[in-house]
Image (cartoon, helix red, strand yellow):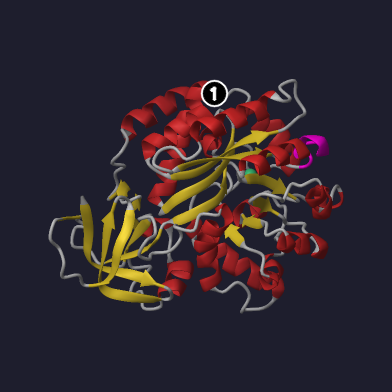
């Protein structure tokens, strides 16, 4: 059945189409533009008569959605102490049920903030995938891999099995990739093994690179390129300590950088050379990282920070303008995962859309849309979010799940985790 959303404002490039409509068929935008006069056989979606602006659903290019139970754990600790003494010991207690529930909670927060796609790195993929399938988001799910434990080999095997079983399922909403944690938790031999498998399957690689200062002299991106790590579609999170040579390698191998400004600031890792990467033509996208290093899953906040911190850092008010931050959160994210039919509102694209309440006073009067969204907007301006033409968030509710039951089960397990 054809669906239509009528009488709305639509963000088209950097301007607004007033009195617009979006027609959706089989999860795809089949027509979009100014007022439609062909409404035969269509189901009108109700946006309650509000003044609404439709924007592309946002793409969270780096997160760990199974960590919802760790929100606030280890706040304000030094990076190594935070990771090795707080986060990892807690993670060892998480079971498949808790990962499932946490992924549900994280998706609620993302959908509520207008995010339609996320790129994940975590464990127990069956639980994550079940949660994504039920909730209705689009996700690139990568198994966190490291070879410093007895499980060596098994994790990679599990990742390959998950790829074979789930890649392309849920009407194409679920993609499976590979998530080698970082060069400090994966040996070169292990990284090569993962790179070879990912290349053979043409799968995404999602890795943390040069997040902390300690890593700045441990390896170069050229060495990683030489073992074949960048021979497949790759997202490198952070790259705070990428030097000029590293940036050249990112460009040469078309590696996308997931910039996580809140996380880098909160863990005191510093400010990534994003303006330089942008000038060099590297594809930079935006991520929230997890709720224990951010602590929220809101790309409005990341867009704002991205535009602000690089101006401050470079002393150049023209660094990372709002238009660039907005692209990082939308179309650049689509480029990063190599999916050409998301990240823009155009005919033929998937109907992944966030709807903003234009009368929210912080956005009002919304005359300069991109500037207002980036500098004045926040996640709470989103009143509905859809993926493939189905609402996953709608005026305070999550149509596909039982919110209360999930929160109750989550709290029961949460209390035990911290006992
Ligand atoms: Zn991360």
Q: In the picture, residue 366 is in which quadrant?
A: bottom left
Indicate if the residue with disc 1 has its beta carbon within 8 Å of ligand 1: no
The verdict on residue 186 being magenta is yes
The furthest residue to the right: 217
- Residue in the picture at 62% in, 62% down: 284
Relative to residue 140, is residue 104 depicted above or below?
A: above
Q: Is residue 78 visible?
A: no
Image position, residue 329 (x, y; %): 51, 60
Residue 308 in view, yes or no: yes
Along the line of sight, the residue nearer the viewer: 223 or 202: 202
Residue drawn where x is 78% and y is 51% of the image: 225
Seen from the viewer's position, the closer of residues 194 and 68 is 194
Helix or strand or loop: what does disc 1 sit on? helix
**Image side of residue 76 versus residue 241, left or right:** left
Q: What span is colored magenta in the figure?
A: 183-191
- If the image is split into quadrants, where does the C terminus sit? top right
Q: Quadrant of residue 187?
A: top right
Give above or below for 387 relative to 325: above
Q: Residues within 10 Å of mark 1 (few under 14, many from 20)?
A: some
Q: Is residue 135 left or right of residue 248?
A: left
> Picture coordinates of residue 184 (x, y %)?
79, 40
Image side of residue 367 versus residue 240, left or right: left
Q: In the displayed structure, would residue 278 be above or below residue 397?
A: below
Residue occupied by mark 1: 417
Residue 206, given in percent of the width and then of the height, sits at 64, 45
Which residue is at the front of the view, 163 or 291? 163
Count of number-bearing discs? 1
| Res 397 → quadrant | top left
Instruction: Specify whether residue 291 is painted magenta.
Output: no
Q: Work out whether 235 lies above or below 416.
A: below
């Amino acid at each position: 059945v054809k669906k239509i959303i009528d009488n709305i404002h639509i963000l088209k490039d950097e301007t607004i189409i007033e009195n617009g409509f979006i027609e959706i068929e089989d999860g795809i935008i089949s027509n979009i533009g100014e007022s439609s006069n062909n409404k035969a056989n269509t189901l009108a979606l109700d946006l309650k008569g509000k003044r609404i602006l439709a924007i592309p659903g946002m793409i969270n290019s780096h997160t760990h959605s199974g960590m919802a139970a760790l929100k606030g754990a280890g706040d304000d600790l030094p990076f190594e102490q935070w990771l090795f003494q707080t986060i990892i010991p807690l993670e060892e207690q998480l079971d498949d049920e808790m990962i499932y529930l946490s992924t549900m909670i994280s998706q609620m927060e993302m959908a509520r903030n207008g995010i339609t796609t996320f790129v994940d790195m975590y464990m127990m993929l069956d639980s994550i995938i079940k949660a994504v399938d039920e909730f209705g988001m689009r996700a690139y799910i990568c198994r966190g891999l490291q070879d410093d434990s007895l499980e060596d080999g098994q994790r990679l095997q599990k990742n390959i099995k998950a790829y074979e079983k789930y890649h392309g399922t849920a009407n194409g909403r679920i993609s499976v990739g590979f998530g080698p944690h970082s060069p400090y938790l994966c040996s070169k031999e292990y990284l090569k093994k993962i790179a070879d498998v990912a290349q053979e399957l043409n799968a995404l690689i999602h890795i943390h690179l040069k997040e902390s200062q300690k890593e700045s002299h441990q390896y170069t991106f050229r060495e990683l390129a030489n073992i074949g790590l960048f021979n497949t579609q790759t997202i490198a999170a952070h790259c705070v300590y990428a030097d000029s040579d590293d940036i050249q390698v990112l460009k040469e191998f078309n590696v996308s950088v997931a910039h996580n400004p809140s996380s880098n600031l909160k863990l005191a890792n510093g400010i990534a050379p994003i303006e330089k990467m942008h000038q060099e033509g590297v594809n930079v996208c935006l991520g929230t990282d997890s709720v224990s290093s951010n602590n929220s899953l809101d790309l409005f906040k990341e867009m704002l920070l991205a535009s602000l911190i690089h101006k401050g850092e470079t002393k150049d008010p023209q660094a990372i303008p709002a238009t660039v931050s907005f692209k990082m959160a939308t179309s650049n994210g689509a480029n990063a995962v190599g999916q050409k039919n998301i990240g823009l509102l155009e005919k033929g694209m998937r109907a992944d859309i966030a709807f903003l309440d234009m009368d929210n006073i912080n956005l009002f009067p919304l005359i300069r849309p991109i500037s207002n969204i980036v500098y004045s907007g926040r996640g709470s301006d989103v009143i509905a979010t859809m993926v493939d033409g189905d609402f996953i968030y709608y005026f305070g509710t999550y149509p596909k799940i039982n919110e209360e039951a999930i929160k109750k089960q989550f709290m029961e397990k949460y209390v035990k985790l911290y006992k």
